[in-house]
Amino acid sequence: MKIVKKQSIAIIGGGASGIFASLRCAEVAKTEKINVDIHVFEGSSKLLKKVRISGGGRCNVTHHIFEVNDFCLNYPRGRKELLSPFQNFQASDTVDWFEKRGVELKYESDGRMFPVTDDSETIIDCFMQEANKHGIKLLNKMNVKSLKKLDNGKISLFINEDESFIADSVLIATGSMPGGYRLAQNLGHSTTEIAPSLFTFKIEDEILKDLSGTSFPQASLSLKIDGAKPFEQSGPLLITHWGLSGPALLKLSAWAAREMMHTNYKAKLIVNWLGIGHQNDAEKLLSTIKRDNTKTSVGNAYPNDLTKRFWLQLLIKCSISKEKNWSEISKKELNLILNNLFNCELNVLGKSRFKEEFVECGGINLKEINFKTMESKICPGLYFSGEVMDIDGITGGFNFQSAWTSGWIAGNHMAQTKSKD
């Protein structure tokens, strides 16, 4: 009787990418009739932590852009490398994958996609059911301390204080945890500079005072950092207790992640609160308001897209009394209002992390990874997926999509890694 040798698969990291890779690996093994034993080692007490908290507990699964080239434009780092993987598994494939397993996704006006239940537990339950179906061993409180390449091509994992595990192939899917970078370095890999990627700005300014919760549907931002070209973004903006947040600002923080770190998060932010394309158009808007409201106080006639509380704060910043009639507003005062509406200069004093949904830029050097398989070019049998690599996307489901895609591709190939007996 022929004994069928089991391929031993070790996945380090029980987050989005690691779990998704384990599921794909099991599916491929079943189709190809490869006997596999898949272990997922999670250092903490809970699996899928970021999935649970993403999108305010709704789980922003992906983004509703189904054209690969356009999708890749949303990655400050890794855009070129993701082109090929996304040809194999992109956002539309993610939608199909979930729908085939009974999870329907919907998209919102900004393109973000969520389960129709608006509950991240829907995604987690789907993954757990699939893992159980395929007999995948999900192990928490299993901290992989180091890795060693053996003479027969296998990889030895040293776990917790005194446990070990021998695998034919190993996937590092540890996100931005420093331990993952150390494991890769054990086996000869290098890492690029690590920096926070999604963060909000600490700003203290008269125009923001007592306005926490005030939002702007379409602001335009320009970030000026010493020694760098200005970074520009537009979209929804939100005033917070400590400064500014919202999609436009979080996109800005992703693109300027390293530059901001190098200046200790000090910069100048120019805000166009209405997102009006040209200063002439903003000037016409104010002139029209002035012309049509000559007998109205300046505090009671203002652009429709602004809240009254914000407008009054803008007037305070301009040292203009809200009781003045528009007919009394001088050319100089009109220009002052215009400047604070269209080119409002704010000093960025520091950063705050974006809730618990932190993302880091930096990670395993992309030149050391084969993006057709996600296998290491340095250590055969070692694979990478997700945020442990020097890949990060802007907010909106892009980081999860790179996690699904890289995990799917790694899962495709891990079961087929051959080491010597």
Image (cartoon, helix red, strand yellow):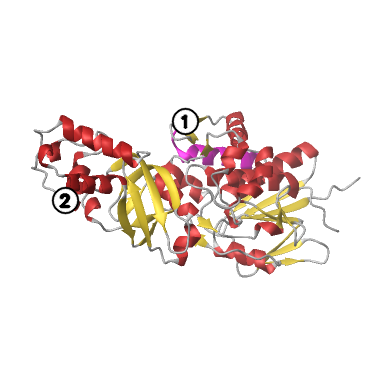
Going from the N terminus, do you reach mark 1 or mark 2 first? 1
In the picture, the disc for residue 116 is 1
Front: mark 1 or 2: 2
Q: Main secondary structure of the magenta part?
A: helix
Left or right of 193, for residue 217: left
Task: Name the residue rendered at 48%, 31% in the picture.
Answer: 107
Q: Secondary structure at mark 1?
A: loop
Query: Which percent across, then down, holds residue 86?
Result: 65, 41
Placement of 264 over or under 140, stated as above or below: below
Query: Which percent across, then down, holds residue 308?
Result: 19, 39
Q: Nearer the viewer, residue 154 or 339?
A: 339
| Magenta span contains residue 299 | no
Q: Which residues are magenta?
A: 117-133
The answer to which image quadrant residue 382 occupies is bottom right
Q: Could you tell me if the residues under marks 1 and 2 are in contact, i.e. CB atoms within 8 Å?
A: no
Identify the residue position indicated by label 2 in the image. 316
Task: Name the residue rendered at 16%, 30% in the picture.
Answer: 292
Task: Name the residue rendered at 57%, 43% in the picture.
Answer: 401
